[in-house]
Amino acid sequence: MYKNDLLKEMLEESGISGYEHTLSNKISSFFKEYAHEIYTDKLGNLIIHKKGTSKNPIKIMLAAHMDEIGLMVKDIDKNGFIKFTNIGGVDQRTLLAQEVIIHGKEELFGLIGTKPPHLQDPSEREKSIKTEDLLIDIGLSYEKAKQIIEIGDPITIKREMVSLKNNKVAGKALDDRAGILAMIHCFEELKNIKHDADVYAVCTVQEEVGTRGAMVSAYEISPHIGIAIDVGFGRTPELSKDDTLELGKGPGICIGANIHPNIHHRLQTIGKEYNIPYQVEISPGNSGTDARSIQIAGCGVATALLSIPLRYMHTSVETIDLLDIKYTARMLAYFISSLNGEDWEGFLCY
């Protein structure tokens, strides 16, 4: 059931918001054995369609975003150092001393550096370093650098996935390639489970800059039900239990204005019936995920959100428990099959 090799391949591939195309080809190959149809829409969303057994099936859309946060070349100074800005919600405190790859005419390795502490005055040591004060050293002169790098080239953090104890792994972009792996496992489960519904797994683009991919794909598919699979804040000692999810205890089933209550309750029922651990996640307003864009697409879509617990969000050492991916996938598969013969119009009434 564990496809660690697929997760590792996804995490170590680049796919910053707006530059997901190389990753899309790789993910497509992972879904190939489970799909009736795979295609890419005009915005770059990867859509995997698995047909159901009904002659008049409802459509269920699953969505997990494949884009990651990253950086972009802003300028090259006269000494060949690279100035940069962020794409998505990058915490500048995590950037110092990172290894990066600049995706120019060829891939260039670089290091993010700043003034040594020995040469800082006391006031500088007490302040957080700003992105504009950081530079990438690629070891080239200005003349050599500008032959390979252009303004606007994307930059990714260079990080390999590492395994920790007790089923945990860490790396960059687990937000939200963990969700994509959950969809792959869900489709694997559905090979052996009868389901009336047509299922669309969408690997969305540009979630980190405004959930744009989900908006476009949900409008095109026009599903009856949409379920976003994303990550939630994993518990660490300094964080409140009220705002976090515990690793290894299943996905957070979100409840709030963004969520259709009947789908929320059915997901809880599935968890109890099949002994799938889950937690309840509260989101009073906009969830800040693809669920928001799915919900308001077209004439509106009945929407839910499953959150895989993740520590250290938007860093290069995001950490998850692989069991939570397994639990999420099983919950999705059994939810889909639970709709067999269901009066879905009645089910989706408030």
Image (tube, grey):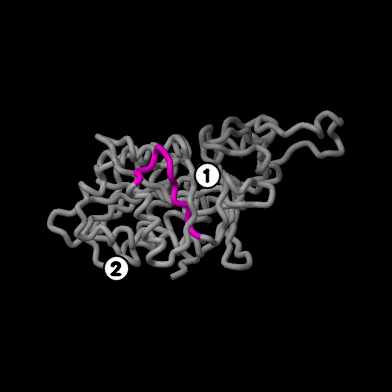
- What type is the residue that disc 1 sits on? His
Residue 259 on the magenta segment: yes
Q: Give residue 174's mark.
A: none
For the question of whether residue 29 can be seen, the reply is: no
What percent of the width, then of the height, locates residue 337?
A: 28, 62
What percent of the width, then of the height, locates residue 303?
A: 34, 44
Q: Give residue 103's mark.
A: 1
- The reply, left or right, for residue 307 in relation to residue 224 is right
What percent of the width, then of the height, locates residue 253?
A: 44, 51
- What type is the residue that disc 2 sits on? Lys
Nearer to me, 50 or 46 = 50
What percent of the width, then of the height, locates residue 242?
A: 58, 46
> In this rendering, is residue 187 above or below 116?
below
What secondary structure is marked by label 1?
Answer: strand
* Image quadrant containing the N terminus: bottom left
Nearer to me, 145 or 227 = 227
Q: Which residues are magenta?
A: 250-261
> In this rendering, is residue 134 above or below 46?
above
Residue at 67% x, 36% y: name it.
Answer: 81
What residue does disc 2 label? Answer: 191
> In this rendering, is residue 168 above or below 205?
below
Nearer to me, 59 or 69 = 59
Q: In terms of image quadrants, where is residue 314? A: top right
Closest to the camera, between mark 1 and mark 2, is 2
* Disc 1: CA contacts within 10 A as few (<14), some (14-19) or many (>=20): many
Pointer 1 or 2: first along the chain? 1
Residue at 44% x, 54% y: name it.
Answer: 179
